[in-house]
Image (cartoon, rainbow, N blue to C red):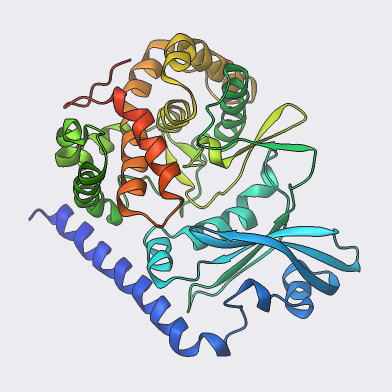
Amino acid sequence: MSETASRVAIGLAAHLGRGVQRVATDLIVGRMRALPRTVEELDAPLLSRIMGRAVTSVAVIGGDAGTSSRARLALTGDGVPDSVFVKIPARTIATRLMGELGRLAETETRFYRELSPHLCGLPRCYGTAFDGLTGRYVLVLEDLGDDRCAFADTLHPLTVQQASSVVERLALLHARFWERVPGWAYTASGDSTSLLTGPLLKISARRIAETTDIPVEDGRFIDDNYRVVARLIDEPPHTVMHGDAHPGNVYFRDGQAGLLDWQAVRRGHPSRELAYTLVTGMTTGDRQRHERDLLDNYRRALAAAGGPLLDRDELWDRYRMAALYAYVAPLITAGIGGMQDDEIALEACAGVWPLSTTSTRWHF
């Protein structure tokens, strides 16, 4: 094993150990810590401390679960919003361990504390709390569940107009942090946990092959060579990326796109984000007919917001190669299960599969 590979393996072992330790510590002493284990435990004194405002009452309006436990809360108090949206850790140990593997809670709370004040087109943050000992957290956000916002989802492809609005939103994000990426944001390929991606791809492909007719065997080359290709995709220049801008994390307000769920923030080249967003977000036909125009819209918006004017042909070439990520994410999500509704993940996986071949080329 090379020295670099040894360092990555050691880093992975340390990271996995830290995640397991956090979850185990929470099981033992979590009840004695300040942050709650369930949404029902979010009371007025705790929210007052997190929000820095005097909350006098809290009532749960509704909620759901995925990679986190989420709920809408009705509030009363001095200068507090009528309702908020909160996120806390998932209830199941397996999902929590997956979250620790991806640093989801730590990443999202840090993003909202440090980076979100410089951006628009995302929910307002009223407060965050993160416990490094147990991995527990509370994220209090603007409640978007009203008539002003329309939410996309992974089962309904974006229209061309919607996709254009999304890439323009991404351009504003990328321009703001172009080659000014905070040190804690890492590339997907540079993280030690990327050692697990290849094995997870193979496990997921095997499980999907057993239960669906999706031709997962066509992706064997990518399964076997993921890290090599991913490093090429993540070559500089870098900016801050949302990291998971599929339709399920998109909303529209007053005709403009906004982005939700900032738990997968990474550094990287914008081609990765653009390929993932357009491939998972549009029908194959719409994407093939309009993607060059959409990339041109992105280039213009990036430059107008203070970023560079990217070379058209170079961006196109890197975008084509970066479609790897549109294959990896839904395949692992569908194959492993539990991170979101299985049917949604399988629909996304089936939707991108016609793009894949046994090399890093794609049918564009």
The C terminus sits in image quarter? top left
323 shown above or below 43 = above
237 shown above or below 132 = above
Residue 66 or residue 34, whichever sits in front: 66
Residue 16 or residue 115, whichever sits in front: 16
x 43%, y 67%: residue: 96
Number of numbered labels in the structure image = 0
Percent x, y for residue 353? 30, 29
Most extreme residue toward the left is: 1
x 56%, y 88%: residue: 31
Side of 297 relative to 40 (left or right): left
228 shown above or below 289 = below
The N terminus sits in image quarter? bottom left
Most extreme residue toward the right is: 78
Percent x, y for residue 59? 78, 70
Residue 109 or residue 246, whichever sits in front: 246
Side of 326 relative to 286 (left or right): left
x 46%, y 28%: residue: 274
174 shown above or below 296 = below
Residue 94: quadrant of the picture: bottom left
x 44%, y 70%: residue: 92
Percent x, y for residue 197? 26, 49
